[in-house]
Amino acid sequence: MHNHTLTELSALLRSRQISSVELTEHFLRRSEKYNANLNCYITLTADMALAQARSADAALRQGGAGPLTGIPIAHKDIFCTDGIRTSCGSRMLDNFIAPYDATVVARLQQAGMVLLGKTNMDEYAMGSSNENSYYGPVRNPWDQQRVPGGSSGGSAAAVAARLTPIATGTDTGGSIRQPAAMCGITGLKPTYGRVSRYGMIAFASSLDQGGPLARTAADAAMLLTAVAGFDPRDSTSADQAGEDYSAALTRDISGLRIGIPKQYFDANLAAEIKEIITTAVRQLERAGARVSEISLPNTHLSVPVYYVIAPAECSSNLARYDGVRFGYRCDQPQDLADLYCRSRSEGFGREVKRRIMTGTYVLSAGYYDAYYLKAQRLRRLIRDDFHTAFSNVDVIIGPTSPTTAFRLGEKVDDPISMYLNDIYTVSINLAGLPAISIPVGFVNGLPVGMQITGNYFSESRLLNVAHQYQQMTDWHKRMPAGFN
Ligand code: GLN
C-alpha cells in the first residue's frame, strides 16, 4: 500500500478499494515503527489523523470528495497547525501550541488530506544536514550513518522511507531540494510568492517558500495545485491565480531549450555526480530537448551573499522570541534584561545564535553599507544573470548538491564547509525563481539529485520536464533497503 503514488491512492480511495482509515492506519504503523531509527517526526498526530480519515471516508462515500481526499500527509514542523505543537525544531517553541493553521495546512485540510504528524527539521530551518534540531538529527534511510540533508530532512526521510505518501517542506536556500536530492525523492521549490507564507514560521522572509517533497513530479503537481494561489493574509503572496499543475505533465518536451551553466560543473563537483547529470541531460536530449552551455558569472557570489542576507533577515525575524509572549522562558528571571538574555540563550541552539549574531553585525550602523547593502546589490546581479540566461533557454539544469549525503557529524564543526554545500541552491532563492530536484542516479548506493530551474511562475514547465524524465527512467521508484 505504501508504494502507491498519489494518483494511484486517489483512484483506490475513490473506487472504495481501500478506505482512508485503512490507509492512515497503515502509514501511522509504519511511521511509529521506523521513527525510532530515523527520527523524522517530532510529533505524530494519530488520534487526529484517524478522525480526519473517518470524515474523509464519509466524504468519499457521499461522492463529494476531491482528488486528495483521504490521502495522508506530514507537515514540516515550521507550519502552524491549530491545536498541535509547532516547534520549528527549537527548544524555544517546544511548548508552543499554534492557535491557528498556516494557509498551506488549511488548504490541504480543506482538500481532505489527513495529517499524520509534524516532521523534524533544523532549528528555524537553518541548516543543510538536519543536525541542528533540538530533537536530535534525522537519519538518511539510504544509510543511517548519514544525514538526510536539511532543513526539511524529516519530511524527505519520511517520504523516502514510505512513512507518508507526501510531505511539505520549506526552502530558503535549498531546504526542499537538497534533502530531496540526498534522500532520492522529488522536491519542488515554487516561485517566491507562489505559495502563501501565512503561518509558516519566518526565517528569512524575502527567501522563504513552501512546497512539496514527493515521490514523483506528478505527485508534487497534485499537491501544488491544492496549495498555490493568492492569499490575502500574506502581503508577499503573488496576486495571480494558481494553475492545474497536473494538466501539462504529459506535454512533449521536444524543442525544449536546456541551458547548462558552465560554473556548475567546475572542480567543486564530484566527478561521479557530473557524469550522472550529464547522462540525465542526454536522456532529455534524446526526447527532443536542445542543450547549450550558458554562463551564470556571479554563481561564486551566491553563498557569501546568501549568508549575509539570510542571517540579517533572521536576526530581525527572531527578535520576537523574547520569553514574554510565547515560547521558552527562563526560570526565575532577575529583571527584564535577564529574562530576555537567558530565555534567548537557553531557548536557541548554536547555529541559530551564530546567524543572529552575524545578522545583527551586518545590519549594524557602520557595517550596513559594507555588508548588507553590498549583498543586496550583488543579489541583483545574481538575479540579472538568470534573467539574461532565460532569454535564450527555457530551463537551466545542473546538480542539486555538490556531494551525496555526508556522514553525521562530518561537517557540524565546520560551518563554512556546511554552507558551501548550498552552492547550487541558494542563488535560486536570491533570484526568487522556481526549481525542482529529481533523483537521477546513485553513487555508492547514495542518491544523486538533478536541479531543473525555470523562469518565474514556470512550475508547470518544470513539473512537465521532470515528469517526462520520470516516464523514461525509474530512479524515482528505487526504495531504500529495510523499509519494505
Ligand atoms: N542550508 C541553508 C541554510 O542553512 C538553507 C536552509 C533553508 O533553505 N531553509 O540557511
Image (cartoon, rainbow, N blue to C red):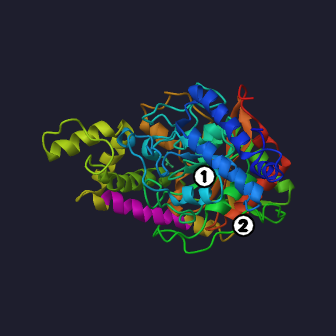
Residue numbers of the magenta segment: 370-384
Query: Is residue 162 among the parts visible in the rendering?
Result: no
Locate residue 150, reporting x and y percent: 53, 41
Is residue 419 found left or right of 154 in the rendered image?
left
Query: Circles 2 and 1: CB distance less than 8 Å?
Result: no
Residue type (three-letter) at the residue carrying disc 1: Gln
Q: Residue 3, relative to residue 263: is it above or below?
A: above
Give the label on residue 263, or none. 1
Q: Residue at x 54, y 47 (%)?
A: 175
Q: In the rendered image, which quarter is residue 142 located in? A: top right
Percent across and percent down for residue 231 are 53, 69
Q: In the rendered image, which quarter is residue 479 located in?
A: top right
Q: Which mark is residue 244?
A: 2
Q: Can you tell which mark lies on residue 39?
A: none
Residue 290 appears left or right of 191: right
Residue 139 percent location from the top left of the image: 57, 30
